[in-house]
Image (cartoon, rainbow, N blue to C red):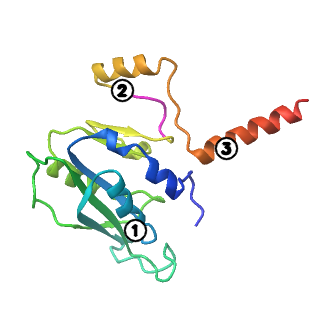
């Protein structure tokens, strides 16, 4: 399936410095059927214990389960999984407020159901939250959303703005290894063509 955005290789996922993001708390990791084992492995590598799983049952505009033509190698997938991991202390967290199933309509490619944000807010109220690989529709109040499809940097908290400017006075750009290689190849080709 051709995706309208860059992806990471499995090894790049494993090497993400997720452990540095928090000492205590939860992680929510969306995975497809093929990547279920990779997702569980990443949770372990990053220091989390899988404590639950949320299933998103995908529906169409008529609220019927998606049955054909979307994803899946052997069977058409009518669901997606969000692995929930925990590490350290979860004092102050709420348990048992939500069901582990979301029934929601499929929208743009890879766009997850908005209901997940409410579930996370209820589970972990008054905590900092970060979303990686976010797009403009993922930006939520009181969340830090990071992604290469966002329009620039929008920081609100004065302390975060100050620390960001100290560390990255000229801004900051993250590129995957594949994107870095593409940039090097493109630069090399343009230098060769200009000679």
Q: Which residue is mark 3?
A: 181
* Residue 14 drawn at (x, y percent): 44, 53
| Residue 192 picture quarter | top right
Q: Is residue 80 left or right of residue 194?
A: left
Residues rendered magenta in the picture: 150-154
**Which mark, by number, is residue 37?**
1
What's the residue at 45%, 59% (across, down)? 110
- The reply to whether the C-beta atoms of the residues labelled 2 and 3 are less than 8 Å apart is no
Observer able to see residue 140: no
Q: Nearer the viewer, mark 1 or mark 2?
A: 1
Which residue is at the front of the view, 47 or 182?
47
Label 1 vs 3, first from the N-terminus = 1
* Residue 76 drawn at (x, y percent): 46, 79
| Residue 80 picture quarter | bottom left
Assign the magenta stretch its main secondary structure: loop
Q: Which residue is mark 2?
A: 155
What's the residue at 50%, 28% (across, down)? 172
**Is residue 151 covered in magenta?**
yes
Spatial CA distance of label 2 from label 3 is: 30 Å
Label 2 vs 3, first from the N-terminus = 2
Q: Secondary structure at mark 2?
A: loop
């Amino acid at each position: 399936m051709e995706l309208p955005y860059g992806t990471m290789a499995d090894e790049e996922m494993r090497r993400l410095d997720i452990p540095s993001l928090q000492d205590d708390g939860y992680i929510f990791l969306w995975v497809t059927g093929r990547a279920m084992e990779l997702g569980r492995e990443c949770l372990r590598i990053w220091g989390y214990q899988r404590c639950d799983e949320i299933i998103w049952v995908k529906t169409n505009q008529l609220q019927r389960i998606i049955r054909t033509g979307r994803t899946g190698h052997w069977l058409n997938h009518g669901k997606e999984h969000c692995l929930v991991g925990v590490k350290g202390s979860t004092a102050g967290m709420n348990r048992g407020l939500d069901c582990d199933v979301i029934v929601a309509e499929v929208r743009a490619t890879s766009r997850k159901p908005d209901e997940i944000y409410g579930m996370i807010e209820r589970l972990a109220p008054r905590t900092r939250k970060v979303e990686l690989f976010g797009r403009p529709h993922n930006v939520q109040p009181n969340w830090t959303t990071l992604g290469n499809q966002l329009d620039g940097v929008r920081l609100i908290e004065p302390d975060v703005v100050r620390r960001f400017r100290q560390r990255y006075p000229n801004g900051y750009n993250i590129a995957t290894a594949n994107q870095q290689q593409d940039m090097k190849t493109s630069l090399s080709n343009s230098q060769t063509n200009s000679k």
